[in-house]
Image: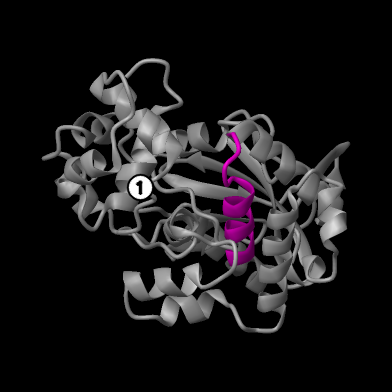
Amino acid sequence: MNWADYGSYIEIYPPKEFNFEECLIFLGRSNQEVLHQMKGKSIVKLIKVDESLILCKIGYINHSIKVEFPISTPSGPSRQKVGEYIWEWFDLEQDVEGFYRAAHQDQILKKLAHQYDGLRIICIPDLFEALVWAIIGQQINLAFAYTLKRRFVEHFGECLVFEGEIFWIFPSFEKIASVSVDDLRELQFSARKAEYIIGIAKAMTNGELTKEWLLQQKDYQQVKKSLMAIRGVGAWTADYVMMKCLHDTSSFPITDVGLHHALKNLLGLKKKPTIKEIEELALGWKGWQAYATFYLWRSLYDKKI
């Protein structure tokens, strides 16, 4: 992480291929989001470091990400952990030059790479949050997925109140390991999803499933196989988690509905492309399928490309 600590605030220096405003557009895509708030050209987000809740105001000035602490200044080690979280959240460790080289030679991605230049995958550093969000989103529309997420967070998460506003963090797996299926059913989760989420929480509480263990595995297929061995995790969920949490740029949630809509819109098709057609379209994306998918998702938030 390239950063500087000024005590009352920190500055994070991203690579040159970074566009904070583009990242803000993606982060602001839903007014149902409960884990951060948009404040003009800044994001206010609650981050948990060890047992402390730290409110962060994240802005961008003079080519650096400035992180201020509106309530109180955390300790030096905590400031560093906040910086590391934000560095991972914006996927700043990733060298994306290879993606841009591939994109500029690809008929589909060429325009998107130019239009959204500097957009990074907005990651989900916490494995439990990534898995739960992916499971929540299975086979329902995005609006209802956000509704379920909000209920889940507000029911089981921790919060902090500042200037009359409530800021939330995602529930811990330890907390969810102790709840019942009926507790989640009351929030309108299906019985299956409730079972999957509680099962994952228990596996993480027992130490059977960790992010570190997944990152230590050798290759894409091995990690995907390990994820798909978890009850409730299919191919799409595994690829989504690998893309958003494990930083695997070759992960490709090829059955994703949003991806299909984006390709249909961009190519002016009358119907969504088939999986075989998408495989052919994606031949030039090898190694960068995750970034190609993310840029295609981004295109859905524009009325006209």
Residue in the picture at 36% in, 62% down: 248
> In which quadrant of the rendered image does the N terminus lie?
bottom left
Q: Residue 128, percent across and down? A: 63, 64
Q: Residue 146, percent across and down? A: 67, 38
Q: Hey, which residue is sitting farthest top in the picture?
A: 304
Disc 1 marks which amino acid? Answer: Ile
Foreground residue among 69 and 293: 293
Can residue 17 be seen here? no
Foreground residue among 279 and 99: 279
Magenta: predominant secondary structure element?
A: helix
Magenta run includes residue 1: no
Q: In this figure, which residue is indicated by the disc labeled 1?
A: 254
Looking at the picture, does residue 118 appear above or below residue 89?
Answer: above
Foreground residue among 261 and 190: 190
Q: Residue 178, percent across and down? A: 84, 70
Q: Which residues are magenta?
A: 127-141
Q: Is residue 76 left or right of residue 254?
A: right
Residue in the picture at 64% in, 73% down: 77
User: Which quadrant holds residue 175?
Assistant: bottom right
Q: Is residue 108 left or right of residue 23?
A: left
Magenta run includes residue 133: yes
Q: Residues within 10 Å of mark 1 (few under 14, many from 20)?
A: many
Residue in the picture at 21% in, 45% down: 282
Q: What is the count of numbered marks?
A: 1
User: Which quadrant holds residue 31?
Assistant: top right
> In which quadrant of the rendered image does the C terminus lie?
top left
Q: Residue 52, percent across and down? A: 78, 66
Looking at the picture, does residue 209 appear above or below residue 281?
Answer: below
Can residue 284 be seen here? yes
